[in-house]
Image: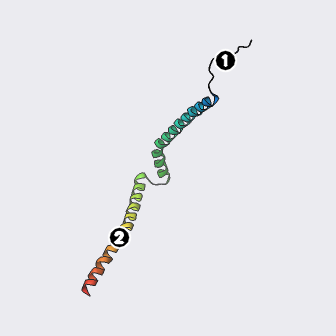
């Protein structure tokens, strides 16, 4: 036996149904991506510590090395600045004596 749909009942537009389903799916996908990102951020510190130990150095050793590298970079940036100031000072002194 076949039942016939009443033509008076409104039928949803297929495009609206498709768009609604796509939006719902996109929201789910974005939520999953957010969960993956959150979990990745949570596991980063232990992973970094494990990698540092795998390198044969403790985290304090790595911090020491990175601090020394940072100081070397800062000194490398400051020395040319002070050399230029010293040159200008020396030229003023030599220029004033002549």
Q: Is residue 52 left or right of residue 87?
A: right
The first of marks 2 and 1 along the sequence is 1
Q: Which residue is located at x 43 percent, y 55 percent?
A: 62
Q: Assess whether mark 1 and mark 2 are in contact (beta carbons under 8 angstroms).
A: no
- What colouring does the structure picture have? rainbow
The alpha-carbon separation of the residues under discs 2 and 1 comes to 85 Å
Q: Count neighbours of disc 2 (C-alpha within 10 A) and say few if under 14, some if 14 to 19, many if 20 or more.
A: few
Q: Is residue 42 above or below residue 53?
A: above
Viewer-closest of 92 and 19: 19
Q: Residue 95 vs residue 65: left or right?
A: left
SS under mark 2: helix
Position of residue 88 relative to residue 57, above or below, is: below
Left or right: 77 as drawn, with respect to 12: left
Q: Which residue is mark 1?
A: 7
Question: Dividing the picture into quarters, in which one does residue 5 lie?
Answer: top right
Q: Which residue is mark 2?
A: 81
- For discs 2 and 1, the disc positioned in front in the rendered view: 1
Q: Position of residue 8 (x, y in %)?
A: 64, 17
Q: Residues within 10 Å of mark 1 (few under 14, many from 20)?
A: few
Q: Residue at x 54, y 36 (%)?
A: 32
Q: Is residue 24 above or below residue 58?
A: above
Which corner quadrant holds the C terminus? bottom left
Residue 74, relative to residue 36: is it above or below?
A: below
Q: Residue at x 66, y 17 (%)?
A: 7
Residue 96: where, in percent of width, then height? 25, 84
Label 1 secondary element: loop
Quadrant occupied by the N terminus: top right
């Amino acid at each position: 036996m076949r039942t016939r749909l009443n033509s008076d009942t409104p039928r949803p537009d297929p495009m609206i149904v498709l768009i609604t389903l796509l939006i719902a799916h996109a929201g789910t996908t974005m939520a999953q991506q957010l969960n993956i990102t959150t979990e990745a951020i949570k596991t980063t510190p232990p992973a970094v510590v494990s990698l540092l130990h795998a390198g044969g150095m403790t985290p304090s050793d790595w911090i020491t090395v990175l601090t020394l590298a940072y100081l070397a970079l800062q000194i490398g940036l400051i020395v040319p600045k002070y050399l230029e100031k010293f040159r200008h000072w020396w030229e003023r002194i030599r220029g004033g004596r002549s």
